Amino acid sequence: MRKATRYKYYFQKHRATTLHYDLRLEMVGVLKSWAVPKGPSLDPAVKRLAVMVEDHALSYDGFEGVIPEGKYGAGTVMLWDIGTYRLLEEAGPAECMKRGRFKFSVKGEKLKGAFSLVRMRDTKNWLLIKSRDGEEKPGYDVTDEMPDSAKSGKSMDEIASAG
Ligand code: MN
């Protein structure tokens, strides 16, 4: 296993046209981003759709607040989870993205341990799957049980009304 470089990890909760979660992983100088409609599951039997969306700049770093109407992603954004991750692969980030399959270990406030991201052939659709590593919690709905911001402790409504 290559030496464990730790990279930035974010999971934002985003109330735009619909509520979804945005997973962002620092890779090759940008934040690779996936929109996860249902958010993460801690049950290894559950595969969550994760649609690759446009990269964000590393400087985007940790945004929480309200994106005004008319702007890309207009709506309320919460820093639902924040931390670091490392790849559990021999290959580096660029190679992992190219082959569309990699395992990584998260050290967040809410999510802990290993997950896989697996791209479905020739699409922007990936699957986010919790690994069986002792950190899995089948039957525990992490998005329901831990709904508030890892950064501020605020709820979506509190962030929205703060403007
Ligand atoms: Mn979003």
Image (cartoon, rainbow, N blue to C red):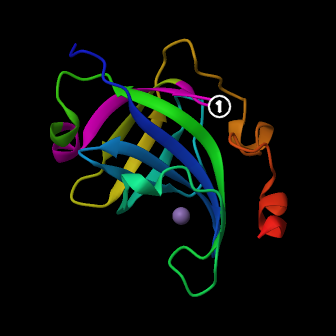
- In this rendered view, identify the residue nearer to me: 77 or 44: 77
- Residue 54 shown left or right of residue 66 in the figure: left
Image-quadrant location for residue 144: top right
76 in relation to 85, above or below: below
Q: Amino acid at mark 1?
A: Lys
- Residue 100 shown left or right of residue 50 in the figure: left
- In this rendered view, identify the residue nearer to me: 62 or 54: 62
Give the image location of residue 52, x and y in percent.
37, 58
Give the image location of residue 91, x and y in percent.
17, 28
- Was residue 23 drawn as part of the magenta stretch in this picture? no
Residue placed under numbered mark 1 in the picture: 110
Give the image location of residue 90, x and y in percent.
18, 21
| Residue drawn where x is 21% and y is 59% of the image | 122
Q: What is the total number of numbered labels drawn onto the structure image?
A: 1
- Residue 154 shown left or right of residue 80 in the figure: right
State the quadrant of the C terminus.
bottom right
State the quadrant of the N terminus.
top left
Q: Which residues are magenta?
A: 96-112
| Residue drawn where x is 59% and y is 48% of the image | 39
82 in relation to 12, above or below: above
Q: Using a 10 Å C-alpha cutoff, classify the residue at mark 1 as few (fewer than 14 neighbours), some (14 to 19) or many (20 or more).
A: some
| Residue drawn where x is 63% and y is 84% of the image | 69
| Residue drawn where x is 58% and y is 21% of the image | 136
